[in-house]
Amino acid sequence: CMLLISIFFPLMYALKLSFYSGDTFIGLGNYIRAVKDPEVGNAFVNTISFTFFSVVFHVIIGLALAMLLNQVTRGRGALRILLLIPWMIAPVVTGTTWKWMLNSQYGVINDILLRLGMIKEYVPWLASMKLALPSVIIANIWMRFPYVMIMLFAGLQSIPNELYEAASVDGASGWQKLLKITLPQL
């Protein structure tokens, strides 16, 4: 009942409102206008890009660190806590911190790159049409990969060690173990 009240009714109400402009029924007019609007298409492409790259790198980084964490025996708890810090910080704090780090005039990323000689002048990371989306994707990856890592780590812990021992006896390489045992078991 609560699910119906909190999700279904607002969803149906929003759907109903999408066929109106103010108090006037316009049918599919809002949808037709949205399809023709180039800004909506651009937003759609940006959303797909953001989602694709975020998910791919969440999984790649999360899996790599989960496998590393799975190999560590001493200090595993401390390492796990360190790796979980980005996920434990409130999103508003993370967003503000990345905004400061990417600031075009006093950001630490510009300062480091300038000192290393990798850039000649400060880069407007969040004001550039080409750099804003990648910058936000990187911040999102940093904030969310620990969740994926801890889920994959839990999965790695549940894989029986006997499978790896049997694969070693059969002469399987590390890559073969990853592709034939680890990934399918996860």
Image (spheres, helix red, strand yellow):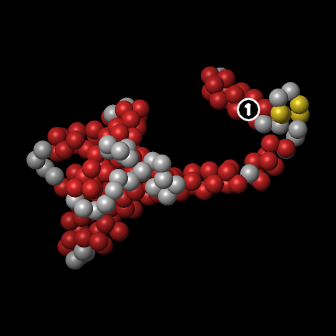
Looking at the image, which is closer to me, 55 or 95?
95
- Residue name at image x 22 percent, y 77 percent: 171
- Residue name at image x 75 percent, y 48 percent: 34
Q: Residue 79: x, y in percent?
A: 19, 44
Looking at the image, which is closer to me, 29 or 77?
29
Q: Residue 39: x, y in percent?
A: 67, 51
Looking at the image, which is closer to me, 186 or 56?
56
The residue under label 1 is which amino acid type? Ala
Image position of 113 (left or right of 59): left
Q: Quadrant of residue 24?
A: top right
Q: Secondary structure at mark 1?
A: helix
Q: Residue 74: x, y in percent?
A: 10, 47
Q: Can you see residue 25?
A: yes
Q: Quadrant of residue 42?
A: bottom right
Q: Is residue 126 above or below residue 181?
A: above
Q: Residue 104: x, y in percent?
A: 38, 47
Residue receiving disc 1: 14
Image position of 38 (left or right of 179): right
- Residue name at image x 36 percent, y 59 percent: 60
